[in-house]
Image: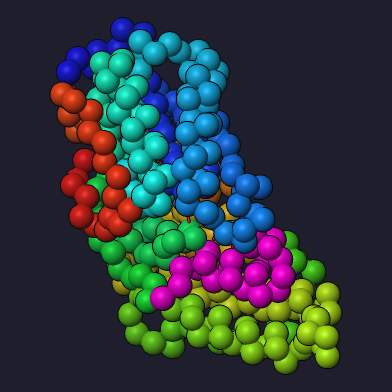
């Protein structure tokens, strides 16, 4: 396949693994030229969570207009596209299929390869889109709605999983606690907002796993402790006072942040590294960002985060991962790959 740039040369990235339709264009040197995101949050809010069928149908509606929009804003034509990177997993099967088939269809029509990208690789490379990007090796803390992982990163595709959650993901714990507090969907950002007006020391909650060896996480015990704390504070009508709700939110957030910071520092010690990269939706949490920045600065190291909008799902991280794997793109009929489950450390090195 000829990759010599006739025009500017871009990789188009497509993200449809869950409830955000994301599209972006990156230049071949990794510079982000344009990105667009359509969030389905309002569509799913009424159901209290993502409804897979509705997610797939809405990706179908949104994807091609977003592609057109991104190409126009990047100032490039279809002839400038060198490859189409798309999220091939992990994620919702139907939602992934939409991105995969649209990517393969466009790739076929434009005579370029389609590149299946691992969603979590997208997240963990997202901080490299920022100015002053971290150098490898580093430790990545991946904290999203579906994952809570610590990964040693020695190169693109050279990943060693150090720790994983044994039950809920951190984002899932945020979402479930938010729902317990009646905050609706999506819970994480709403709980973080409520926590700002609460006292993080008001409710004694466990710091799961921190006193255990290893680098795994567990959030189900914390979830139970929060449920008990909520039940104890309900009045006869079952209602929670606004100040109790804020205190519980703040205490919960502090427990999760302590756990994530403690485990991240232990992972850095284990690897003898000083650079931490944080990615995934929970990486947008301001309390977590502040605590990690302080913890890393105290060790003479540095914590790197994507900008807030690239913590949660987006097309930019997929386009960027596509650039880093462009040399592995295969010619021939574009592949349609959708892998709802896909372990990160089975990826080949780039
Ligand atoms: O990475 P992401 O957008 O989607 C997945 O791949 O899962 O992460 C979404 C998760 C949700 O659980 C959401 O509640 C959580 O990230 N989240 C937050 C914040 N913003 C998003 N959790 C805590 N604080 C936030 N500010
Ligand atoms: Zn994600």
In front of the other: 283 or 68:
68
- The residue sitting at 39% across, 72% down in the picture is 165
Residue 32 position in % (x across, y down)? 47, 28
166 left or right of 221?
left
Residue 335 drawn in magenta: no
Give the main secondary structure, helix, strand or loop, of the magenta stretch: helix
As drawn, 292 above or below 60: below
Q: Is residue 173 magenta?
A: yes
- On the question of residue 114 being in view, the answer is yes
Which quarter of the rendering shows the N terminus? top left
**Residue 82, horizontal then vertical, whole percent:** 31, 19
Residue at image coords 60%, 52%: 44
The foreground one among 255 and 305 is 255
Callout count: 0
Q: Position of residue 309 (x, y in %)?
A: 58, 43
> What residue range appears in magenta?
167-191
Relative vertical location of residue 188 with respect to residue 201 in this rendering, above or below: above
Q: Specify the quadrant of the image occupied by residue 327.
A: top left
Quarter of the image with the C terminus is top left
Is residue 324 positioned above or below 196 on the image? Answer: above
Image coordinates of residue 179 in percent, x first then y, are 65, 70
> Is residue 277 or residue 39 the one in the foreground?
39
């Amino acid at each position: 396949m000829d990759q010599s740039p006739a025009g500017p040369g871009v990789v188009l990235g497509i993200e449809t693994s869950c409830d955000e339709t994301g599209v972006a264009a990156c230049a071949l040197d990794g510079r982000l030229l344009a990105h667009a995101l359509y969030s389905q949050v309002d569509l799913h809010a009424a159901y209290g969570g993502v409804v897979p069928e509705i997610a797939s149908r809405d990706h179908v509606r949104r994807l091609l207009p977003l592609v057109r929009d991104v190409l126009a804003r990047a100032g490039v034509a279809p002839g400038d596209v060198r490859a189409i990177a798309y999220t091939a997993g992990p994620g919702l099967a139907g939602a992934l299929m939409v991105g995969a088939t649209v990517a393969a269809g466009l790739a076929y029509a434009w005579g370029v390869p389609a590149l299946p990208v691992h969603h979590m690789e997208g997240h963990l490379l997202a901080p490299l889109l920022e100015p002053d990007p971290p150098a490898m090796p580093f430790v990545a803390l991946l904290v999203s709605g579906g994952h809570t992982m610590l990964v040693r990163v020695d190169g693109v595709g050279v990943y060693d999983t150090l720790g994983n959650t044994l039950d809920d993901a951190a984002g899932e714990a945020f979402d479930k606690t938010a729902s317990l507090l009646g905050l609706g969907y999506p819970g994480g950002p709403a709980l973080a907002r409520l926590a700002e007006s609460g006292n993080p020391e008001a409710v004694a909650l466990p710091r799961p796993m921190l006193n255990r060896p290893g680098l795994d996480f567990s959030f189900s015990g914390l979830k139970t402790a929060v449920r008990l704390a909520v039940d104890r504070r309900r009045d006869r009508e079952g209602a929670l006072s606004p100040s109790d709700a804020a205190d519980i939110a703040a205490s919960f957030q502090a427990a999760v942040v302590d756990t994530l910071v403690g485990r991240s520092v232990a992972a850095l010690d284990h690897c003898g590294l000083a650079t931490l990269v944080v990615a995934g939706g929970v990486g947008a949490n301001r309390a977590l960002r502040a605590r990690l920045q302080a913890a890393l600065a105290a060790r003479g190291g540095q914590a790197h985060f994507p900008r807030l909008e690239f913590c949660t799902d987006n097309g930019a991280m997929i386009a960027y991962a596509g650039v880093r794997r462009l040399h592995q793109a295969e010619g021939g009929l574009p592949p349609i790959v959708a892998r709802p489950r896909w372990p990160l450390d089975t990826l080949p090195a780039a």
